[in-house]
Image (cartoon, rainbow, N blue to C red):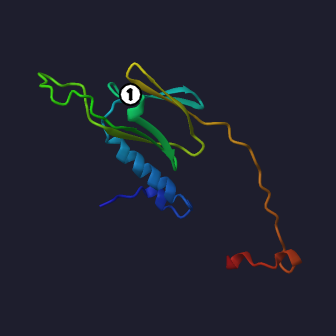
Amino acid sequence: MTTRTLVFDSPFLLGFEPTRVLIERAAKAAVEGYPPYNVEQLSDDRILITMAVAGFSPDQLQVTVEQNQLLVTGRRKGDGREGLAYLHRGIAARGFQRTFVLADGMEVEGALLEHGLLHLDVWRPEPERSIKHIPIRTAGSPAACTDVRKH
């Protein structure tokens, strides 16, 4: 059974269904434990995500952004060490998929793999400020030929 956030049940919040979906997606992603990561606030408009991806090469990692979702995927390819007998295997050798939900306007500027750490630069460019003036029509005027109550 899915529980809905009561905030989104308000009749004054119209069109926020996609936001509810994003929050549910983020809650699901929070349960994932591998690989470990840090999220640092570098400034008001900059975030650095650092993921521990030891043993992965750049061609085994993929970073994509689709519909406000940052997805980092790691796929292991055979490294020729599959037949070895380990006395202890503490370095994870499995693939992963880690998701982060981005707010509107957030952009991933770049990714850097360094010393087994994948650094993702995320920032929010300053939005263009715009003001939209809505004309007020009067009943019976030629400009009021469409009735807003019928839409």
- Quarter of the image with the C terminus is bottom right
Instruction: Depth check: give the residue in front, 78 or 74.
Output: 78
Q: Which residue is mark 1?
A: 57
Amino acid type, mark 1: Ser
Question: Residue at image x 21%, y 27%?
Answer: 81
The residue depicted at 57 percent of the width and 46 percent of the height is 104
Between 38 and 94, the one nearer to me in the picture? 94
Q: Quadrant of residue 140?
A: bottom right
Q: Looking at this view, name the residue that lies furthest to the right.
A: 142
Q: Is residue 104 above or below residue 52?
A: below
Q: Position of residue 124 (x, y in %)?
A: 60, 36
Q: Position of residue 141 (x, y in %)?
A: 88, 77
Q: Nearer the viewer, residue 145 or 136?
A: 145
Using a 10 Å C-alpha cutoff, classify the residue at mark 1 as few (fewer than 14 neighbours), some (14 to 19) or many (20 or more). Answer: some
Quadrant in which the N terminus appears: bottom left
- The relative height of residue 95 versus residue 135 in the rendered view (above or below) is above
